[in-house]
Amino acid sequence: MTANPRLGRGSLVQRLTRLNVGVLALTLFLSFVLVQGMAYYTARAQQREAAGAAATLLAQNLAPMLAFQDPRAAQIQLDEVAGRRADLRELQLLDVQGRSFAHWRSRAQVATLARLPGFGQAFELRVPIVLQNEPIGALHWREAQAGLEAMMARIWLGGLALLLLALLLAALALRWVQRRALAPLVALAELTERVATTQDYGLRAAVVHGDEVGRLAGQVNEMLRRIQVWHQDLHQQLQQQRQDGLALRQLAHRDHLTGLPNRLSFDIELERQVIEVQHGLQALGLLFIDLDHFKAINDQLGHAAGDEVLIEATQRLSSVLRDQDTLFRLGGDEFALLVAPLHSAATLEQLAGRLIAAVSAPLQVRGQAMPLGASIGGAIAPQHGQEAAALLRQADAAMYAAKAAGKNCYRIATP
Ligand SMILES: Nc1nc2c(ncn2[C@@H]2O[C@H](COP(=O)(O)OP(=O)(O)OP(=O)(O)O)[C@@H](O)[C@H]2O)c(=O)[nH]1
């Protein structure tokens, strides 16, 4: 792992730096080789030219000695020239028949460099010796390029060292330049990563310059702004839908006139409570409440007055409820009460008595005294049934028994 992930091996800065340094290295190396090659061939041509001129001069000087058959003087002349040219390897003066007249050969050790491949090269010259337009012999000249090769080797080594140093400095400079140049792009990449992980669409990129990266940052900001708006809209819509769903559920489960849980809620709750009874967790009491003489109110005072009485009856019934009692309006003038847990049958009977007393208290509807009462039928689970339907039947029958007994009273089902 690298200390700074932005400059890791896969980072754009690293890759661009490597690419630039590679191109730079190739360019510098090729230029270096080209310059070195040109310098080598120029120096070699100069050496050969100088050797040619020296050989011609020596041949002119040797002509009289050859003509007068003076090998000693010729040898002295060869030795003297050889002493002046370090790279000379062999000088040989030949007479017109090709016999050796004077000869000099270098005794210098072969240099280490000359043993390397491509090094140790030598060239040969043959200069005819002419006297009064008559060939009288020839000078054979063999010269090495040791000085030139040593100089080229030094230049190569020094040059390569300088090249490496230049490349190192260039790499550092390029890295710094690219870090600066790519900083907005790196910041942009970091921003998008942060948006992806935090889902914070309120984040914005800094637009430093008006170049391509600056324009890209501007576009990213615009996209983020739109996503933020969409996100907020979506959030609001979801919230609205959740509220609508809650309201709908409320509507579906509540009686709109009295605000009590309706028949649907009653069915669900009864099923739930009955299951607890079946598991032996509790006893359940059910009271079926039907108002007495309610139709007369409707008929005499109108439907709206009937509604008011239904609300009043709800309040009266609710006033005697305890925490474990839940009142439902089943429809019309029918109510139901679930008592869970139910501790005894006596409790259910007491509750039925209190409900009747509350409902049948004197009632004034629009200034007119109206009779109101309630007939209640009770059933207990598990004694009177362990299924919802059975329990309902029992309570219903008990309620009709109360009606039959003269109304405004309660009856509890018999097992
Ligand atoms: N105002 C009003 N009346 C309703 C509503 N729903 C049903 N009713 C009426 O309530 C009356 C109920 O009828 P019953 O229970 O037979 O009348 P009752 O006079 O109470 O008869 P008993 O139960 O025998 O005493 C009917 O006239 C229905 O039209 C309602 O939401 N509002």
Image (cartoon, helix red, strand yellow):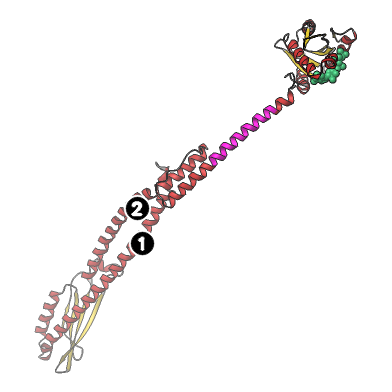
Judging depth in this view, the residue of 378 and 318 nearest the camera is: 318
| Alpha carbon separation for disc pair 2 and 1 | 16 Å
The residue under label 1 is 26
In the image, what residue occupies the spot 56% across and 38% down?
A: 231
Would you say the magenta stretch is mainly helix, strand or loop? helix
Whichever of callouts 2 and 1 sits on the residue coming sooner in the sequence is: 1
SS for tag 2? helix
On the rendering, which quadrant does ligand 1 occupy? top right
| Residue 235 locus on image (x, y percent) | 59, 35
Query: Pointer 2: residues within 10 angstroms few (<14), some, or many (20+)?
Result: some
Is 30 left, or right, of 394 in this rendering?
Answer: left
The residue under label 2 is 174
Q: Quadrant of the C terminus?
A: top right
Whether residue 232 is in magenta: the answer is yes
**Magenta residues (range):** 227-247
- The number of numbered badges drawn on the structure is 2
Whether residue 300 is in magenta: the answer is no
